[in-house]
Amino acid sequence: MSQTSRASPGRAAPPRPRQGAAFLARPPAPEAERPPRPSPSAGEAARAARGAVSLGPLGDTIGFHLRLAQEASFAAFARRSAGACRGGQPAAALKPGRFAMLAMIHENPGLSQTALGAAVGRDKSTLTPALVELERRGLVRRDRGADRRSYALSLTPAGEAALDALGRHAALHDRLLDRLVGAENRDAFLDTLRRLIAGLDTERH
C-alpha cells in the first residue's frame, strides 16, 4: 500500500508547471546572451526627428511633402546603387540626378548642354559642375559643337557600362515606388506630377 506524501506544516508544496507551457517558466537569458537590438536606420531616425518637431503649416503643404518625398527617393536609390560597378571595379555611387543625365544623353547622343538642362530641370550653374564631374570620371564626352559656343554630349564606353549597371538598380527602385503608390494609382499619380511640372514651368515664364 503506497504512502501519501505529506507537506511540511506551514509550507505549501510548489506547483508543478504544465508540460505544454514549460518554455514560459524559463528564466530570462543573461544580458550577455541576449541578441543586440538593431540600431535604427537613417530613415527611422529622420522620421523620429520629424515626429518630435512641430511642422506647423508645413505639415499640410504639398510643396514640403514633395521635397521630403524627393529626398527620401534619392536616398533610397543611393543606398540601392551603392554597389554599382564601372569597368568591373567598384565605383563611387552616382547621385540619382547624375543617373538621369546619363540616361538622357544615352537616349539623345549629341545633345547640347542647354537641351539637357531643360530636360532634367537644371540651370547652367548646377548642370556644368555635374557634367564636369561625369567627364572627369570618364563617363561623358563633351565635344565642341559646330558653332564652337556649345557642347555636344555623348557617353563613353565606361559611361554606357555605368548606365547599364545603374539602370538595373533604377528598375528595382521604381518597382518599390510602384508598390508604395499602388498599381491602381500610378497613372493618376504620374499625371498629377506632370501637371505640377507643366503648370509651375508656365508660371516661371
Image (cartoon, grey):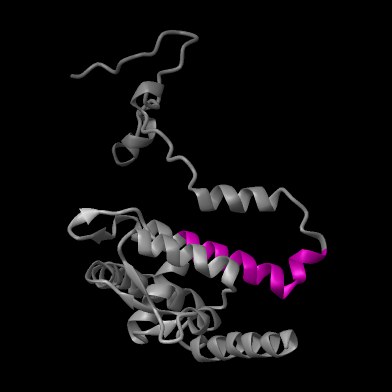
- Observer able to see residue 204: yes
Query: How many numbered discs?
Result: 0
Res 31 quadrant in image: top left
Magenta segment: 57-75
The N terminus lies in quadrant: top left
Percent from the top left, x then y, of residue 175?
Answer: 38, 76
Mark yes or no: residue 69 visible: no
Whole-percent x, y for residue 125 in the image: 59, 67
Image side of residue 121 versus residue 179, left or right:
right
Q: Is residue 92 magenta?
A: no
Depth check: 112 or 91 in front?
Answer: 112
Q: Nearer the viewer, residue 200 or 156?
A: 156
Give me the residue at 36% from left, 13% from top.
Answer: 6
Q: Residue at x 44, y 63 (%)?
A: 132
For the C terminus, the quadrant is bottom right
Is the stretch drawn in magenta largely helix, strand or loop?
helix
